[in-house]
Image (spheres, grey):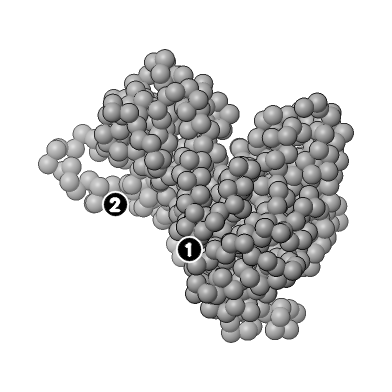
Amino acid sequence: MRITDLLKADAVALGVKVADKSAAIDKLVSLHEKCGNLTDVAAYKEGILAREEMGTTAIGMEVAIPHAKSEAVKAPALSAITVPDGVDYGSPDGAPCKLLFMIAATLDGDVHLEVLARLMQMLMHEDFTAKLKAASSQREFLSIIDAQETAQFPDEPKAEAASASGYRVLAVTACPTGIAHTYMAAEALQKAGDEMGVSIKVETNGSGGAKNVLTDEEIAACEGVIIAADKNVETARFDGKPVYSTKVADGIHKPKELIDKIINKEVAVFHSDKKAESSSAGGDGAGRTIYKHLMNGVSHMLPFVVAGGIFTAIAFLIDTFAGNAGSGDFGSVNAVAAWFKTIGGVAFNLMVPILAGYIAMSIADRPGLLVGLVGGFLATSGATFLLPGGDVPSGFLGGLLAGFVGGYLMLGIEKMCSKFPRSLEGIKPVLVYPLLGLAGIGVVMCAINPIMGLINTAMNNALIAMSETEGLMIPLCALLAGMMAIDMGGPFNKAAYVFATGMLSFQTDAAYMIMAAVMIGGMVPPLAIALSNTIFKNRWTEEERRNAPVNYIMGLSFITEGAIPYAAASPGSVIPSCIVGSAVAGALSALFGCKLMAPHGGVFVFATMQGTWYWYVLALLIGSVVGMLMLALLKKPIKE
C-alpha cells in the first residue's frame, strides 16, 4: 500500500491559517470527515486528543503527525495541511509546525505503523518537506509524495527498469515479523546497488506478503541471487543460479559485500531437489537451521497471539468499566465482555497448533502441516494413551516439540516411501503421508505429553510462585527486558519475545507481567537514542540528529529496530546504554505490577493493561532517561 492510496486530493488543504494546535486538529479531522473516512467524528477526535495527552506528535523540523486508532474509522486514511505561518504544536525542537499529516487507522491490522514508519523516513529528507510546504496545488502535493516514495522505497517497483539484459543481481529479504528488518535490508541493498552501478531488484517478504516479486524472466537473466532472511523463503525457483543465503542483518550492514560475492562469482550454484522447496539455499549450520524453522512458526503464530490477546484485554477492560473487577468470572460477566473474551480465546487457543504446524511445514514442506497442527493440538489438550481426550496439557513447550518432531518425522516417512512404485506417486501426498504422519504424531505426543505436561505445570507453578514472592519477579523481568536491547531484533531479542508470548498461554498474572516487561524493554532503545539526540546534540553527527526523531515514533510503536543504525555506528556506547535502560524499565514495570495481555502495539494498547497504565508510562520514561544519561557518559562529544 502506497501513501497516495491513503491520501486523496480532497484530504489535502494548502496555505491554511490556524490559530493554535486545537484549530489545526479540527481542520485535519474535518478533512477526514469531508472525504467520508469517519463514522463518528467526535469519537475519532477523542482518540486524537487522547494520543496528544500522552505527548506531542510533532517530530521537529516543522512537521507533526497526529494519529489515532479508532472504531470510528472506516478504512485507514490520511489528511494533510500546510501552514505557511506555522502553528505552535509543542514540537521538541521548539519550531512551529508548517506541515501536518493526520493518520486515521482502524483497530484491526498495523497499517498505521507501516504508514508512520514510511512517512517518517520520507520526512527525514529536508528537500522533500520543503517541496511539500511550497506545493501550489493538491495535485502537485500528491505527485511530490509519489515521486519521493517511488525513489526511496525498494519494496515498491521503481520507475527505472533493469537494462535490456535484465537485472544483474536479485535479492529476497525477510524477517520473522516482516516489518522493520525486511525493508531496512531491502533499502540498504538497493542503495548499495545504485552506488556500485549494479542493477538490482529486491523482493520483500513482509508482513503484508511478498512485494516486488521476482519474475521467472528476471531470475533467468540475473547473475545470482542474495537471500537475506531469518525465515524460510521459496528457493526452488532459483534452481541452477548462484544463490548466497545469509541472515537479514547482513543485508542491512553488509550490502556491498553481498553484491560483490555475486558479481565476483564467489557463490556456488544452487540445485533444488523439490519443486516446492522452501529451505535455505546456502548450507546453514544446524543452529541457524533450527532458528529459521522456529521463526517460521513464530511469525505465523504472532497474529493469533496479538489479536487474541488484545480481544481478551478488551474484555477485562469492559468488565472493569462495568464495575465487575472483583467478580470471580472477571472478563465474562458483562455480555459484551464475554463476547470479546470468547472470540479472543478462540484465536489465542490456536497459537500452539499454528506454531507447531508451521514449524513442521518449514521442515517438511506441505506434508508437515498436518502432523504439526495435530501435534500442537494434542499438546494443548494433553492427550495420553490412557486419556486420549486430554489429561495434563504440555502447552507451548509441547507445541515446540510437536513441530520439530512432526517435521522430521514426516521427512523420515517421505524417505521411507521413496521406493514406492511410480504408479503410487499420486496417492502419497493425499493418503499415505497423512495416514502415516497422523499415526506417528499421535503415538509420539501421547507418549511425551505426560512428561512435558509435568514440566509445563512446574513452569506455571514456578511463575506463580515468583509473582507471589517479593524480589524474584523483578530480576526476571529486568533480565528479559534487557535481552530485548542486546541485538534489537536478533536472536537474543527474539528469544525473550518468544518466551514472553509463549508464557501468555498460561493466562496468569505472572505471564502478563513478563509480557509487559518484554514490551517495555523493546520500546526503550529507540526512545533513549531519540532523547539523546534531542538533548545531547554534540554526541551525534548532523545526519544522526536529523534522522533521530523517527525513533520517537518507532519506540512508542514497539519497533526496536529503529535503534539499529545507531547501535551499528557506536556499539560500545549504544548497546550497553540501551540494555541498562531497558532492564531498569522492565524492573520498574514488574515493581509497579503492570500486566499486559497484548504482545504488540506499543502505546496503542496501553489502555488495555491490567493495572494503572500511567505507572507503565512512568517506567518507560525512567528507563529511557537512564539509557539517555548513560549514553551521555559513554559517548564522547564529537566534532562535525
Residue on which disc 2 sits: 435
Which residue: 53% across, 66% down? 11
* 604 to the left or right of 397: right
Mark 2: give few (<14), some (14-19) or many (20+) Cα within 10 Å. Answer: some
Q: Position of residue 288 (x, y in %)?
A: 52, 32
Q: Secondary structure at mark 2?
A: helix
User: The N terminus is located in which quarter?
Assistant: bottom left
Residue 8 shows which numbered tag?
A: 1
SS for callout 1: loop
Q: Is residue 476 left or right of residue 487?
A: right
Q: Can residue 218 be seen? A: yes
Report whether 40 appears left or right of 158.
right
Q: Which badge, 2 or 1, comes first in the chain's sequence? A: 1
Image spot of residue 413 (x, y percent): 31, 40
Contact between labelled residues 1 and 2, with CB atoms less than 8 Å apart: no
Residue situated in front as seen by the camera: 619 or 292? 619
